[in-house]
């Protein structure tokens, strides 16, 4: 999203780029095509190999699950697409980042279980926001709200607030 001063003294917030990573795949066109075709990304999963209870859900795109921390890869991938779509390149001077996650670093957590070295920094929810801020050398605020199922919406609202207040000209949310 980008901001621009309004005559009233506040700032108007405009979404200028969209990047998506959904269970359909990486990219807004892939996801939008699947949604328009009425496809569902929800599937049935087995709890374990012994025939435990089944549960419904959606998985991350297979091409991103191979990374060390898929949620970080997904955040960077979506941010890259959004910036390209917005035709923005260098936002380091005036850019901020608000990327919330509620379950991050589960692979790092699994590796740390049973070891006395404590939790690795990749386990913390702010890892995706830190990775995006580092990738584009953002010098504005880097925030990570955690609000369960509302985390994405809270991130967008907080990003818009940073623009309205004048703290940032551009926010990746």
Image (cartoon, rainbow, N blue to C red):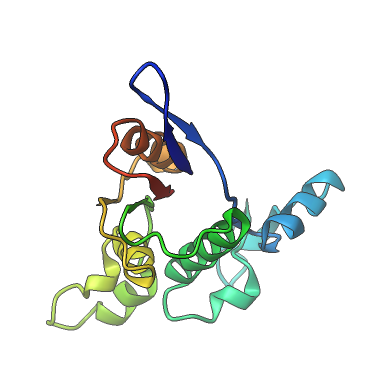
Q: Could you say where residue 27 lies in the image, as x and y percent from the top left?
A: 67, 61
Q: Quadrant of residue 125?
A: bottom left
Q: Can residue 54 be seen by looking at this rendering?
A: no
User: What is the residue that sits farthest to the front in this orientation?
Assistant: 7
Q: Could you say where residue 32 lies in the image, as x and y percent from the top left?
A: 75, 50
Please determine whether, in this image, residue 80 is positioned above or below residue 157. below
Instruction: Look at 52% across and 59% down and name the residue there.
Output: 88
Judge left or right: residue 52 versus residue 127. right
Q: Quadrant of residue 44?
A: bottom right
Instruction: Look at 22% across and 72% down and name the residue there.
Output: 121
Number of numbered discs? 0
Q: Nearer the viewer, residue 160 or 125?
A: 160
Please determine whether, in this image, residue 118 is positioned above or below residue 162. below
Q: Nearer the viewer, residue 5 or 22?
A: 5
Q: Could you say where residue 111 lies in the image, as x and y percent from the top left?
A: 31, 81
Q: Could you say where residue 153 lies in the image, as x and y percent from the top left?
A: 46, 37
Please determine whether, in this image, residue 64 is positioned above or below residue 164. below
Instruction: Look at 36% across and 37% down and name the residue there.
Output: 163
Q: Can residue 139 be seen by looking at this rendering?
A: yes
Judge left or right: residue 52 versus residue 152. right
User: What is the residue that sits farthest to the right in this orientation?
Assistant: 37
């Amino acid at each position: 999203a980008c901001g621009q001063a309004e005559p009233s003294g506040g700032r108007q917030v405009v979404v200028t780029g969209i990047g998506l990573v959904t269970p359909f795949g990486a990219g807004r066109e892939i996801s939008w095509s699947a949604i328009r075709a009425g496809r569902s990304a929800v599937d049935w999963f087995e709890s374990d190999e012994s025939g435990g209870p089944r549960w419904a859900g959606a998985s991350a795109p297979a091409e991103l699950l191979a990374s060390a921390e898929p949620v970080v890869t997904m955040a960077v991938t979506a941010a890259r697409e959004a910036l390209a779509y917005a035709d923005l390149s260098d936002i380091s001077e005036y850019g901020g980042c608000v990327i919330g996650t509620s379950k991050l670093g589960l692979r790092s957590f699994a590796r740390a279980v049973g070891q006395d070295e404590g939790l690795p920094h990749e386990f913390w929810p702010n890892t995706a926001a830190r990775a995006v801020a580092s990738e584009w050398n953002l010098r504005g605020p880097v925030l990570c709200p955690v609000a369960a199922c509302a985390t994405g919406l809270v991130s967008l609202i907080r990003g818009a607030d940073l623009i309205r207040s004048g703290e940032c000209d551009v926010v990746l949310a």
